[in-house]
Amino acid sequence: NAGVTQTPKFRVLKTGQSMTLLCAQDMNHEYMYWYRQDPGMGLRLIHYSVGEGTTAKGEVPDGYNVSRLKKQNFLLGLESAAPSQTSVYFCASSYAQGLGNTEAFFGQGTRLTVV
Amino acid sequence: AQSVSQHNHHVILSEAASLELGCNYSYGGTVNLFWYVQYPGQHLQLLLKYFSGDPLVKGIKGFEAEFIKSKFSFNLRKPSVQWSDTAEYFCAVNGPGFKTIFGAGTRLFVKA
């Protein structure tokens, strides 16, 4: 049982390049999330999905796109990378929202540097 | 808007010292509360959670947290820290109608 798996783990991009981060979960979770982690700012939600075929904007969505074509996969795309997108990106999934069993399970993270 | 405040950004303790990390949230309704831990170079892992019932919650590795509804607080405690507790700790909250919000994190360094 792998849990939440992110690829790649590290990446260096030049300004203006594009890339896609892949997140896969094998826990049959409905909800999936992409966060970015920056020093002193905690985790900020970029986009999320409440089920296959659905996506929604989070707190900091600009410059990113996402897709959830399959329940187990959640892709994060950077259309034209900027130095401000240098960060550590975490994917997470959860069983439910609302009240109760809503804790998130996180992937190992992707450290992205944009030069 | 909902928010989570963690009082200390950096904490340095000696081994065997007691730990208390503060967390306050702003939301008047029913919430779920969490503490996550991130060891150096690793991903976030759930330390403990509160949904309902006993406001004193026990988690892994000897950690506990107390939910005080009147103070909108969910402070994390450990009676005696170890060097291996060196990590960053995040308080988080979610609830009906809003997604999980994380605090800025507290970096704990435990001196051996």
Image: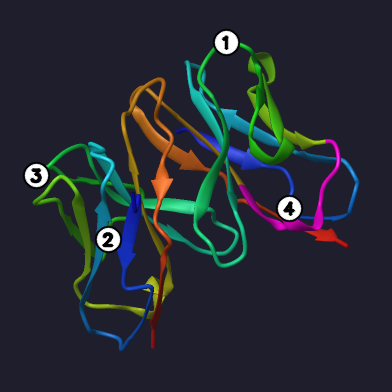
Magenta-tinted stretch: B79-89
Q: Chain of mark 2?
A: A
Can residue A54 be found in the magenta stretch?
no
Q: Which residue is mark 3?
A: A53
Cα separation between marks 3 and 2 = 20 Å
Can residue B87 be found in the magenta stretch?
yes
Residue type, numbered disc 1: Gly
Residue type, numbered disc 3: Gly
Identify the secondary structure beneath mark 2: loop
Residue A99: x and y in percent read 39, 20
Q: Is residue B75 above or below residue A107?
A: above
Q: Chain of mark 1?
A: B
Tell me if label 1 and label 3 are in contact, CB under 8 Å: no
> Looking at the image, is mark 3 or mark 2 nearer the viewer?
3
Cα separation between marks 1 and 4 = 27 Å
Q: Are marks 3 and 4 on the same chain?
A: no
Cα separation between marks 3 and 4 = 40 Å
Residue shown at 22% from the left, 76% from the top = A19
- Which mark, residue A62? 2
Q: Is residue A69 above or below residue A75?
A: above
Label 3 Cα crowd, 10 Å radius (few <14 / some 14-19 / many 20+): few
- Which mark, residue B85? 4
Task: Name the N-terminal-most of marks 3 and 2.
Answer: 3
Residue type, numbered disc 4: Asp
Q: Which residue is mark 1?
A: B53
Residue shown at 32% from the left, 63% from the top = A6
> Looking at the image, is mark 1 or mark 3 nearer the viewer?
1
